[in-house]
Amino acid sequence: MSAAMENPIILDLTPTYGAMIVGTYLSCAIWGISSLQTYLYFWCYDDDAIYLKLLVGFLWCMDTIHQIFVCKATWKTLIQTFGGIVNLGALPQETLHNLWSAYVVVGIVQLYYFRRIVNFASRTSYGRRWWIWPLYAFMTAVFLAQYASLFGFLSETFNRPVAALSEPLAMDFATTLLSCTAGIDIFIGAGMFALLHAQRTQFRATSTMLGRLSFIVVNTGLVTALLAITTLVLDVTYDSSTNLWYTVGQIPACSLYFSGLLANLNSRQYVRGHGGIRTISNFEDLTPPVLDSGISHTFTYGGSSKHTRVNRLPTSTFGIVSNGAVVVDVHKHQATDHDEFSDNKSVDVEMGRMDTKSADVEVGRAH
C-alpha cells in the first residue's frame, strides 16, 4: 500500500491564524460565561429599571454579533478554502467588523462606569475639588480620541491586504486606540476604588460592604486594564503584517467588558448581604422600636449605654445618624436595585452627608 502523498507546501500559521484561533477560543469561552450571567441577571433582578434591562439585552446582542464575526474571520481561510495560498495574504474583513462591534460594547460599558463615578463623586468631598471637572474633561477627550483613532484605523485597513496593518499611519491609529482604551480602564478602576475607599467608616458591616464592592470593582476593572495593556504591548512589539499576537487580547475584549459589567450588576445582593433587608451596622443587639412619635429606646453598644429618641418615622425606614453622617437606611421591603452608585431612590443604602436637624432618629449618650 503506497503512502499518502504529502502536501509540498507546508506553512506555519502560528503567528497569524494561530493567534486568531487562540483569541477566538478565549472569546467563545467568555461569551458563554456572559450569556449565563445575562440569564442570571434577568432571573434575579427582574425588578430593575426597564432601561437597565434594555441595556443588558442590547449589549448581549452586540456581543453575540461580535462573536459571529470572530468565528467567521477564520472560517473561509481555514475551513472553506483550506489549503489555498491566495487567501493567506488577504485581510479577512470580518476582523474589522468584529473590531467596531467590539467597541460598541466597550464604549457603552465605559460610559456606564464613568456615569457611576460622576454620580458617586458628586456626593463626596471629591465632587468639590477644583480638579475634578478638568479631569472629567480630559477623560472625555481621551474617550473621543479612542473612537477617532478607531475610525481612522478602519478607514486605513478596510478592503486592504494584511500588509496594510503594518503601514505607519495604521499602526499609529492602532497604538492610539489601544493606549486610550488602557488609560480609560485604569482611570475607571482607580477612580471607583478611591471613591469607595474614601467612604470607609468605623462601622464594621459598612466597611465590609465597601470592601466587597471595592474587591469586585477593582478586579473587574483591573482585568480589562491589564488586557488592554497586554494587547498594546503585543501590537507594538510585533510586526502586524506577519504577527497577529495582539488579537489574543483584542478578540476576547468585547465579551470580557460585558462580562465585567454583568459581574457588577449580579453581585449587588452579595455586596449588600443576603436577604431582602440590608442592615449596615455593627450593633450587637438592636431591635428597632415601634416607629411612632415620643417613643424612646435604650440599648447597649460597645459597653456604653446609648439612648435612641424616635420621632415620627415612615413605616418603611429606620435610619441612624451619628455626627451628621448617614450610617444606615434599611427598607423593610425588597427595594429595586438599579445601580450601586445611583440616586437614593433606587438603592437601599445611601452614603453621604446630611443635617442632623432633619434626621428622624438621633443617637446620643445617656446621662
Image (cartoon, rainbow, N blue to C red):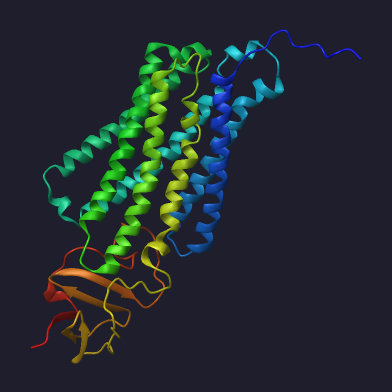
The residue sitting at the left extreme is 367
In this picture, is 98 found above or below 266?
Answer: above
**How many labels, in total?**
0
What percent of the width, then of the height, locates residue 352?
20, 63
Q: Residue at x 36, y 42 (%)?
A: 222
Q: Is residue 364 above or below residue 329?
A: below
| Residue 202 position within the rendered picture, expressed as x and y whole percent measured from the top left | 20, 67
Relative to residue 60, is residue 6 drawn left or right? Answer: right
Query: Seen in the image, is 222 located left or right of residue 306?
Result: right
Whether residue 176 is situated above or below residue 211 in the rendered picture: above
Quadrant for the N terminus in the image: top right
Q: Residue 195: x, y in percent?
A: 24, 52
> Which residue shows up at 27% across the image and 87% down it?
291
Give the farthest residue toward the top.
8
Percent coordinates x, y for residue 107 in the rendering = 39, 38
Closest to the observer: 354 or 74? 74
Look at the image and tell me whether residue 51 can be seen: no
Corner quadrant of residue 49: bottom left
Q: Residue at x 27, y 88 (%)?
A: 289
Residue drawn at point x = 49 percent, y = 41 percent: 255
Q: Quadrant of residue 19?
A: top right
Q: Quadrant of residue 306?
A: bottom left
Task: Give the quadrant of the C terminus.
Answer: bottom left
- Residue 97 shown left or right of residue 176 in the figure: right
Q: Is residue 193 visible?
A: yes
